[in-house]
């Protein structure tokens, strides 16, 4: 009858098992490699197993500059553009331009990027892109709309002066508004169509001036000086405010004027034109 192993034997067995596990995990024991017999000539001529073939055959991919790939890229950029996702649209345009330099698709992508900037009000950056496009690709299909967009951007960047004959009707020179406010406080606001502000400015100036005169006649030089200084500050402030009001008035008129010119020139149609039409 075999006796059960003692504590010493159990410890030795456990230690041996741990040592084998450590050696195996450290790669010190080489794995058992099963030899594969060579294939015979008959097996090489045997048709492949249908179950081992892929379910779908590999689809042919168009070339990088192929028409199908280019159309899909433009459609994706155009979908981002029409969705208002300007950041992703510009990122996709830059990716395509970097991936395929010299591709015929390049001028249309550069025009799309300029349209993104124009739509965002970044007319200076759009102008630089368009000038570069026309300099490098003057005969491309994207050149005519690029010239049209360049002219529209010039109208935004170089608006006519308020006192020039080309200025929109109703424009007010800021110098004229300041000159009127110099002689009569608040008169500059009357020119910009703000009678309430003009009356309030005139009333406050008269009130401070009358208060300073009354304090001086009452033998109160300190309050009289304080009211006089307040009146001078208000007088100078209303002259500057009249100039700013004239500038804002001209900007509103210019915005309406340029919007009308833009519609007549087809600005909205140009910005919404599909990229595949070029």
Image (cartoon, rainbow, N blue to C red):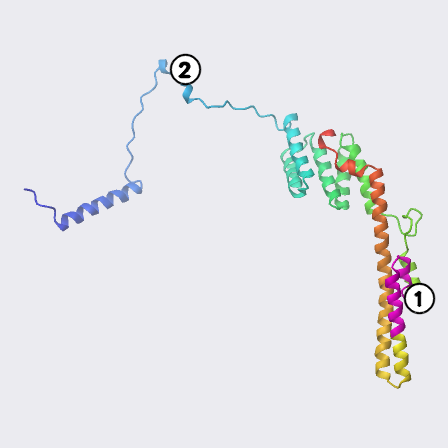
- On screen, 251 above or below 102? below
Q: Circle 1 — which element?
A: loop
Q: Is residue 206 left or right of residue 47?
A: right
Residue position marked by numbered label 1 in the rendering: 184
Which of the 4 image quadrants contains residue 147?
Answer: top right
Q: Secondary structure at mark 2?
A: loop
Nearer the viewer's eye, disc 2 or disc 1? Answer: 1
Q: Which quarter of the figure has residue 215?
A: bottom right
Which residues lie in the magenta part?
A: 185-207
The residue at which mark 2 appears reads as 47
Residue 124 place in picture, x, y as percent: 77, 46
Image position, residue 123 (x, y; %)? 77, 45
Q: In the current view of this chain or complex, which residue is farthest to the front?
A: 196
Asked if residue 66 shows in the view, the reply is no
Q: Is residue 208 above or below residue 59?
A: below
Quarter of the image with the N terminus is top left
The answer to whether residue 196 is magenta is yes
Q: Residue at x 85, y 77 (%)?
A: 227
Q: Which numbered disc, 2 or 1, marks the residue that appears first in the sequence?
A: 2
Determine crowd level at label 1: few under 14, some 14-19, many 20+ residues with C-alpha closer than 10 A. Answer: some
Q: At 69% across and 31% down in the image, what residue appears? A: 105
The secondary structure making up most of the magenta span is helix
- List x then y, in percent, for residue 241: 84, 62
Where, by quadrant of the figure, is residue 37 drawn? top left
């Amino acid at each position: 009858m075999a006796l059960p192993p003692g504590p010493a034997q159990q410890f030795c067995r456990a230690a041996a098992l741990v040592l084998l596990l450590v050696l195996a995990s450290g790669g010190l024991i080489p794995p058992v490699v099963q030899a594969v017999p060579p294939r015979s000539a008959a097996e090489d001529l045997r048709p492949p197993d249908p179950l081992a073939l892929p379910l779908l055959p590999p689809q042919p991919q168009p070339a990088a500059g192929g028409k199908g790939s280019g159309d899909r890229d433009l459609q994706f950029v155009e979908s981002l553009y029409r969705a208002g996702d300007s950041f992703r649209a510009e990122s996709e345009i830059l990716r395509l331009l970097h991936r395929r330099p010299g591709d015929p698709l390049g001028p249309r992508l550069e025009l799309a990027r300029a349209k993104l900037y124009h739509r965002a009000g970044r007319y200076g950056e759009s102008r630089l892109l368009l000038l570069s496009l026309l300099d490098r690709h003057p005969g491309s299909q994207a050149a005519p709309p690029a010239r049209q967009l360049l002219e529209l951007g010039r109208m935004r960047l170089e608006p006519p002066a308020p006192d020039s004959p080309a200025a929109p009707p109703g424009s007010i020179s800021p110098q004229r508004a300041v000159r009127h406010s110099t002689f009569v406080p608040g008169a500059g606001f009357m020119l910009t169509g703000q009678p309430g502000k003009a009356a309030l400015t005139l009333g406050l100036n008269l009130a401070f001036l009358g208060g300073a005169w009354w304090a001086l006649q009452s033998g109160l030089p300190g309050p009289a000086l304080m009211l006089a200084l307040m009146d001078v500050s208000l007088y100078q402030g209303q002259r500057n405010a009249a100039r700013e009001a004239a500038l804002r008035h001209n900007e509103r008129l210019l915005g309406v004027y340029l919007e009308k010119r833009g519609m007549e020139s087809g600005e909205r149609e140009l910005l919404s034109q599909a990229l595949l039409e070029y």
